[in-house]
Amino acid sequence: MLRILLTGPESTGKTLLARRLAEVYQTAWAPEYARTYLENLGRPYEESDLLHIARGQLLLEDYQAQFARRILPCDTGMLVMKVWSEFKYGRCHPWILEQLQQRSYDIYLLCGTDVPWAYDPQRENPNEREELYTIYKRELEQLGVPYTELRGGVEERLEKVGMLINSR
């Protein structure tokens, strides 16, 4: 099974693409745990919540892997947690950094900012998407993992990812 990490700034199509990949390949996918966590929190999140979100994300990913066939699209991962934490709080919990180094994916996808930003009460950075995109790109390069930048509409992105999957 190929684990596919979708990463990048908020509102760049990660969830839509992960969901569509799961539909096309008739497989499970790992949604963004933060969304559910924050919806149920009942208060503004704090820095300590990011560690709970990170742990929940990895547990959800491992759970969904049991049901995956051929691929497991993962809508976010520890790279998002690291960038989020450092951008908002100026630091990142060591456990998240450790997991970022330990957990690997077969395909890394960096979703581009060429799709319009869509309002969502959980989104915080509509004006920093390009800055954040540059940070994600730099972080992927520092991790030393091969990654593919995705641009265009969902169908164009699906086609590009399909070629990556089929080449494996």
Image: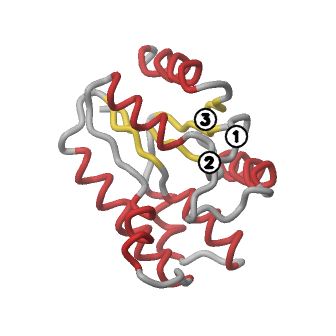
Residue 92 image point, x, y percent:
60, 75
Residue that appears at 57% across and 40% down: 13
Q: Is residue 55 above or below residue 68?
A: below
What amino acid type is highlighted by mark number 2? Answer: Ser
What secondary structure is marked by label 3? strand
Q: Are marks 2 and 1 in contact (CB under 8 Å)?
A: yes
Residue at the image position 40 percent from the left and 79 percent from the top: 41
Dot 2 and dot 3 residues touching (CB under 8 Å) = no
Q: Position of residue 115 (x, y in %)?
A: 68, 36
Mark 2 or mark 1: name the one nearer the start of the chain. 2
The answer, for residue 158, to whether it is visible in the render is yes
Residue 32 location in percent, x, y? 43, 55
Rounded to the nearest whole Å, what is the CA distance between mark 2 and mark 3?
19 Å
The N terminus - image quarter: top left
| Residue 17, numbered circle | none
How far apart are the alpha carbons under marks 2 and 1? 8 Å
From the viewer's perspective, tell me whether residue 117 is left or right of residue 82.
Answer: right
- Which of the two residues, 159 or 59, is positioned nearer the viewer here? 159
Give the colouring mode of the picture: secondary structure
Quadrant, the C terminus = top left
Residue holding disc 1: 116
Q: In this rendering, is residue 159 above or below 92?
A: above
Local crowd size for mark 3, using a 10 Å CA cut-off: few (<14), some (14–19), many (≥20): some
At x 52%, y 16%, the residue is 159
- The amino acid on which the numbered mark 1 sits, given as a three-letter code, is Pro
Sequence order check: which comes first, mark 3 or mark 1? 1
Q: Which residue is under mark 3? A: 147
| Residue indicated by mark 2 | 11
